[in-house]
Every structure is written in structure tokens, then in C-alpha cells.
Image (tube, rainbow, N blue to C red):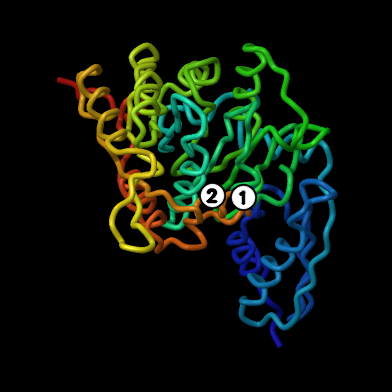
Amino acid sequence: MASVEREAIMAALATVEDPEIHRPITDLGMVAAVDIDGGSVAVTVLLTVSGCPMKTEIIQRVTSATSEVPGVTNVSVELGVMTDEQRTKMRESLRGPAKEILFNRPGSLTKIYAVASGKGGVGKSSITVNLAVALAARGRTVGLLDADIYGHSIPGMLGLDRNPTVVDGMLLPPEANGVRAISMLPFKPGGSAEPVAFRGPMLHRALEQFLTDVWWGDLDILLLDLPPGTGDVAISTAQLLPTAELLIVTTPQRAAAEVAVRAGMLAQQTHQKIAGVIENMSAFPCPHCGEPTDLFGSGGGDSVAASLSQALGTDIPLLGRVPFDVRLREGGDGGEPLSAEEPDSPAGMAVSAIADQLAAKKRGLAGMSLSVTPAGR
């Protein structure tokens, strides 16, 4: 039997992505050796860290890809660990030697939405999580930044079951339901009950670190779950991510709508665009007679969209109304988002319709290098 060609093995390994970094292991310098003896192939892979939580997945991916090469009869995978120098080299190859917000680089195609509300209790985080899951289900690569530093809730609602992996100071965000996410929770030794006692400058720094120290990879869409109101984090988001567009979440209730308008009006001062308004806890069919039940009133979403359109002199659309559904809350409490578990429910379909609108939006050319020069005369 002819020996398997090394080039064929390397080509197969080039199709294997690291599950956390989402780049080929050959590009990351993770393939340390390939030994071929007839049809038997032994591959030595260097993990980024000794406690890599994805080592089993890496072994499976390498074994599967290598086994597909014609002539291969047996595959063995041995694991090693990168040296400090190798980790630094890999990090710099991904991010460059200096820390920066990669989403602000000219040519970035990531669409950024900051989900805001005027007050708490309107279901903003539930909407954000379910939108992220719905967008991922549409084949988009989605990141979710829990920017509510004090009231972080994304890990539990999304169903994250592990902490970020740290490689040479670079954070690799865990993934659940197809969404990569980061939050303050893993960085609190006291767990969920430990308060975050940060003043304004520290809030800004925390948000900045989530944008510079986290390796998000090549995202189609980044969602930020902002804290309610128009305080430090909302202002810092506009400063750190000038291309971020706002999604304003309200309920049908008049009092909630009036406060939501204030959250949207911040865009006038921060020079941000408002992508649209989402009305949560909207009317739902009565389980007995089927008639619409306005548990929290009606008209709040339309009112917010109309008020912002008039005040800002531009068309602010009402992207959708998500009906009140106890399963939306239950899914968040259990770490099983409704968009993943019951996408055909009325609330799930409403979120899906909003996700379709956001997925269809393209990043404009503003701030992007076109790599062209004027033609000579």
C-alpha cells in the first residue's frame, strides 16, 4: 500500500477550526507534528492552554478530517500545550501587537446593535437573548455582550455552562445556542450574588476590556444588552462603538413608552442611528375566547416610534410586537431561549420576524477603506 501524502493530510487539517477561536488549527500553529506510516497517521496538536475545555471536540474534529483522506486506515491524535511564546505569537497574529477594538477597523463588516430601554422590567434582556439566538439560527455569526455590568443576566438566560478561556490575556468567549457571549459573571469570585461596586470610569473600562480583550472572531452581528437608562454605559457604548445602532425596547404601557423615548433621544447627543423600536409584552390571545388581551395596555411601541421619528427628523420603524408569553420568561429562567425551543410560538415568530429585518440590513460604506485611487487625467 502506498503511503499517504503529507500534503493531503495538511490540506485536511486546514479544514479543522479551533472551536473557540474559529480559525484553522494550521493557521494558529496548533499542528506540531504529522507522522505517517503507511495508512496510519499520528497528529500532534498543541492546545492553547492545558485545561482547554474543548480538547475532546478538537480530537474528534482532527480524527474525522484526517480519516477522510484516501488511504488513511488509522488516526491517532496526541495533545501537547503551547509555550508562552507560541501563545503570544498566536494572539498577535489574530489581534496585532496593540490592543484595539477590531470592530472599529476600516472595512469591518460587523453590524452592531445596542439594545436599550428607558427603564428596567420591560424584558430587554429576554428580547436581546432571543434575537441573538434567532439570528444565529439564520446562519449569522452572532456575538452577545452583556453590557449591563451591574445587572448582568445573559449567561443564565442563554444557557452558558462554562467560563471564557484565557490565552495570553485574550478571552475566548463561551458559546451556547450558536451565540458567543461575555458577561461580568465569570469575573466575580463570589458568584452571581456578589455585587459589582463600580463607579463610572470603571464601568467604561470594563466595557472597553470586553471589546479589546475578547476574541470575538469574524462576527456578522454583535448585540449589546445595555443597562436601562441613559447613564455611563450607554454613553460609553456610543464612544467606543460609534457605528452601533440602537434598538429601543418598550412595553405597550404609556409610562414605559414615555421613558423609552428618553432612551432613544440620547441618540441625538451621541450621534447614533436608531435601527427601530420593539414592543414587548404586547397583546396575546385569551386562552378561553381567543380575543386579544392587552395586559399592559396598547400603543406603546407605535407611540415611541412616532415620537422619536418626529423629534429626530427621520423614520424610526416599529420593528415588531412580541406578545406576552410566559414561556419567554420560563425559557430565560431555564437557560433555554424560546427562539431555540419553541420558535413557532406566537412570541417566537414575532422575534423571528424582527430577526429577519435585522439580518437583512447591510453595513454601509461609511468609514470603510475602498482601496481605490482617482484615475489620472
Residue 17 placement: quadrant: bottom right
Residue furthest toward the bottom? 1
Q: Which mark is residue 333?
A: 1
Which is nearer the eye, 86 or 271? 271
With respect to residue 46, does 115 lie above or below?
above
What residue do we see at 20% from left, 28% from top?
315
Residue 99 location in percent, x, y? 63, 24
Q: Residues within 10 Å of mark 2 (few under 14, many from 20)?
A: some
Residue 219 appears anywhere in the view: yes
Which is nearer the eye, 79 or 120? 120
Question: Is 144 displayed left or right of 34 in the figure?
Answer: left
What residue do we see at 73% from left, 52% from top?
30
With respect to residue 281, does 367 lie above or below?
above
Total of numbered circles in the picture? 2
Residue 267 location in percent, x, y? 36, 18
Q: Which residue is mark 2?
A: 329
Residue 375 location in percent, x, y? 20, 25
Q: Which mark is residue 49?
A: none
Which is nearer the eye, 14 or 196? 196
Give the residue type at disc 1: Asp
User: Label 1 near label 2: C-beta < 8 Å?
Assistant: yes
Give the residue type at disc 2: Arg
Question: Is 171 displayed left or right of 314 in the figure?
Answer: right
Residue 93 appears anywhere in the view: no
